[in-house]
Image (cartoon, grey):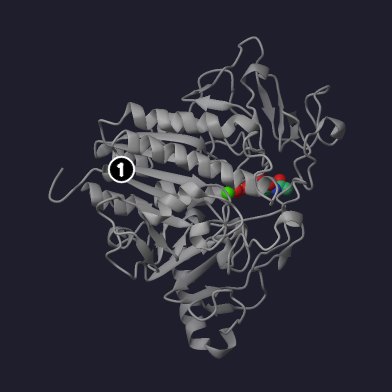
Amino acid sequence: MTGTAQRPNIIVMYADDLGFGDLGCYGATDIPTPNLDRLADQSLRFTEGYASAATCTPSRYSLLTGSYPWRNPQAHILAGNAPLIIDHDEPTLPGMLRDAGYVTGVVGKWHLGVGDGNPDWNGELSSVPLDVGFDHSYIMAATNDRVPCVYLDGRRVDGLDPNDPIEVQYVRENPFPGTPTGRDNPELLKMMYSHGHDMSIVNGVSRIGYMKGGEAALWTDEEMAEVFAARAVGFVTEHKDEPFFLYYAFHQPHVPRMPGARFAGLTGLGPRGDVIAEMDWCVGQMLDALESLGLDENTIVVFSSDNGPVLDDGYDDRAEELVGDHHPAGPLRGGKYSLFDGGTRVPFILRWSGTVAPGTTSALVCHTDFFASFASLAGQSLSEEAAPDSLDMLSALLGQDPIGRQELVTEGSKAKTLVRQGNWAFIPPHDGPAVSQATNIELGNSPTDQLYNLAEDIGQISNVAAEHPEIVARMSARLAEIRSGKRTRC
Ligand code: NG6
Ligand code: CA
């Protein structure tokens, strides 16, 4: 270590599809989240903290590489057998921290691909988190609604019986005759699908993609929270005496929402509310562990979400019907998949007990910035190629700079970008429907320019592009420049 470098432990807890308005600390009243409330009371709470994208894979790619996701054409929602989209020699946040002396681990949802193309799930997998900076890895390869429905422990499927090999395919028709699918065997389902998700059935839930075999290794959705929580707590316990970085990526509240028995029916909002309560329990497991290990003051705990909220994302779990007065995106317009702020502005809290004063900040920060900011904290200098869009926002993250970024590019689905400067959000014309039929979310696509003043109009109701042609021209040109340029970190 040099100069003022410090090496507190760092835990990034990352929810999946949790909205800006889903938690009590952001104004919600209908879902009990006592552990997150406790964490928030001890944390700096960001009101303008962003994911870099409105869907999972690009967001997570950006968090781990410090690169805007649209730079990598593979950074779109991946199939469960897609190859790893981070090159082995690409600088990563965990790799940088490892160089700084940290032990690094990932637990939970990955969704950045594994293997080098349609992997053999029955042997040692190549191209897993262990190849891009993590020392320890216990993950699901993609999402909880995609096959293969198994856990990966390092390079292997956990609990696989070699006499019952796994096969996985992403094709249109069922390639495994005789194996049930949601489409052909709806009578076997615990929860009906509403769109997509009509392929292989695992644990009474039909998924995206087809799989066969691996019976002993299949996950039980209702136990997933406990499985991952035990691994995450195990990691910090085992490494309590050395600096550690843990990326703990929850599967909640992504579909299919299948809470454990203790949480089923706990809220009035149906499974979506129940799994948020369950995720809160997972957070509590981690906070309790840190406290009992005496690590509170030497550990930065970040909690955030990979993208905004969605109600019906493909299963009939009554999320829309039961949402009542709860507003998952809070005052924001749109949600998951959207170019509006509901897509990317997310809950974002940071605790560093004894160092960062609890409170609220409107500093503009993005998950992309963790790379350069934690490098700065740990005294690591970055090579020219590393983390091309990660800005050193350490002062903002620690509550010392109330402004943060001057500018931020984020994306809706399919790498459609917008740019934020100060309080202005500029969305250029994009092809596509204004509203997604399937999810009933306003996507932000429009044939005309959109300009919103977020300080006066957080709900993006008034498009003021026509009144400010000079701002539109400036921001449009700047977005084009960034998209054609090499990097934004200077
Ligand atoms: C979509 C899925 C959706 C969800 C999303 C990825 C359908 C119809 N919809 O394609 O259910 O899985 O991909 O979500 O299949 S994310 O949070 O991982 O980006
Ligand atoms: Ca997500």
Q: What residue is drawn where x is 71% and y is 68%?
A: 434
Q: Is residue 320 above or below residue 450?
A: above
Work out whether residue 60 can be spotted.
no
Position of the N terminus, as image quadrant, is top left
Q: Image quadrant for the C terminus?
A: bottom left
- Residue at 60%, 78% (x, y): give it: 449
Question: At which x and y percent is residue 332?
Answer: 58, 68
Amino acid type for the residue under numbered disc 1: Asp
Q: Is residue 41 left or right of residue 356?
A: right
Residue 93, quarter of the rendered image: top left
The answer to whether residue 68 is above or below residue 196 is below
Q: Is residue 149 above or below residue 460?
A: above
Few, some or many C-alpha atoms within 10 Å of disc 1 (few <14, some 14-19, many ≥20)?
Answer: some
Q: Is residue 201 left or right of residue 372?
A: right
The residue tagged 1 is: 296
Provide residue 142's location: percent of width, then percent of height: 58, 37
Residue at (43% x, 74% y) in the render: 421
Q: Nearer the viewer, residue 471 or 436?
A: 436
- Residue 395 place in picture, x, y as percent: 27, 61
User: Residue at horizontal 18%, vertical 48%?
Assistant: 5
57 versus 156 height, above or below:
below
